[in-house]
Image (tube, rainbow, N blue to C red):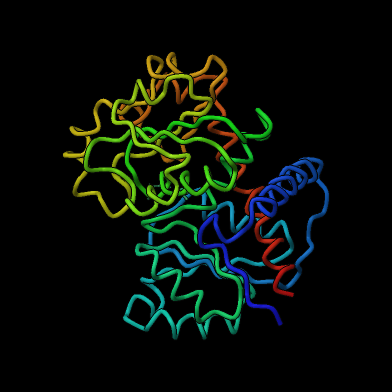
Amino acid sequence: MSPTRHFLTLLDFSPAELTRMLQRAIQMKGEHREGRDQRMFPGTVLGMIFAKSSTRTRVSFEAGMAQLGGHAMFLSPQDTQLGRGEPVEDSARVISSMVDIVMIRTFGHDIVERFAAFSRVPVINALTDDYHPCQLLADMQTWIEHRGSISGKTACWVGDGNNMCQSYINAARQFDFELRIACPAGFEPNAQLLAANADRVRVEHDPLRAAAGADLVVTDVWASMGQESEQLERARLFARYQVNAELMSRAASDALYMHCLPAHRGEEISAELMDAPDTVIWDEAENRLHAQKALLETLLLANR
Ligand code: CP
Ligand code: NVA
């Protein structure tokens, strides 16, 4: 049998596979809206391990699995032996002997890597401190639905060089676009990741210059989960890095802006942009459901 495939970062699939998966997501979204029966995986179980909070990720995976005819099981470290020190490797062996696919949201990226190394079923990274690839599937699906191919376009990241920013670096490589990152000094993404993608990604500390002519502007919270104690200091340091009407006036006239949510109006994004009637942010959130159903289908079929 071929080795189990996982989805820990966007680099686990080829550009062609990612494009196919997003086409399938768009197709499945249409079928779902028509009320078609999508129960392709009866009796299939998704284990969902959440060491951090979630609204979109939990609801989309759980609803998506039900729509595919399977079942989703919520597991939190507080209520499992994971929270009492049972090794990740032992947990992976046991859990993967009972379910068909696993999704993990946690802190260190090494935790999903260690789990995957000992899992006999596919493992999906549902956010670590370093990457959030599921969100990028939804963002890219949203771009494709509104604008077509993103190849050759320019995206501008505004804010922290965090897990979402680092996933955008991988997306720039896999979907072939240029990425400018506007972050305060000291909040750059991983230096090795930047160096490996220097042909298409650059850091520009001035947000207005970084946004000039951009086709897509993206932001995220200034303090991620696990950084709550830094919130006040970050609010001071990031004050210039807000996606608002002034910043969008520097971008291309038909530029889109995205936010993975949850958003803090008046911090990383203005209330005006969040509540604009033509924002694609709500499509972006909904597409978590459709993109991840395509992801679940791809991984489940690959592991049959
Ligand atoms: N964007 C995202 O992952 O949202 P949740 O934290 O609500 O899952
Ligand atoms: N960067 C944010 C993303 C939340 C979906 C965090 O890690 O908290």
Residue at screen point 45% across, 56% down: 127
Q: Quadrant of residue 3?
A: bottom right
Residue at screen point 57% across, 61% down: 12
Of 107 and 177, the residue lying toward us? 177
Taking the view exactly as shown, the residue that stands out farthest to the front is 199
Q: Quadrant of residue 68?
A: bottom right
**Total residue callouts:** 0
Q: Quadrant of residue 219?
A: top left
Give coordinates of residue 241: x percent, y percent: 30, 28
Give coordinates of residue 217: x percent, y percent: 46, 29
Give coordinates of residue 45: x percent, y percent: 64, 71
For the N terminus, the quadrant is bottom right
Identify whether 259 is placed above or below 223.
Answer: above
Identify whether 257 is placed above or below 304.
Answer: above
Identify whether 80 is placed above or below 223.
Answer: below
For the C terminus, the quadrant is bottom right
Identify whether 160 is placed above or below 90.
Answer: above
Give coordinates of residue 195: x percent, y percent: 38, 49
Asked if residue 227 lies left or right of residue 30, the reply is left
Of 44 and 4, the residue lying toward us? 4
Asked if residue 80 lies left or right of residue 283, the reply is left
Residue at screen point 51% across, 28% down: 216
Of 155 and 130, the residue lying toward us? 155
Asked if residue 72 lies left or right of residue 247, the reply is right
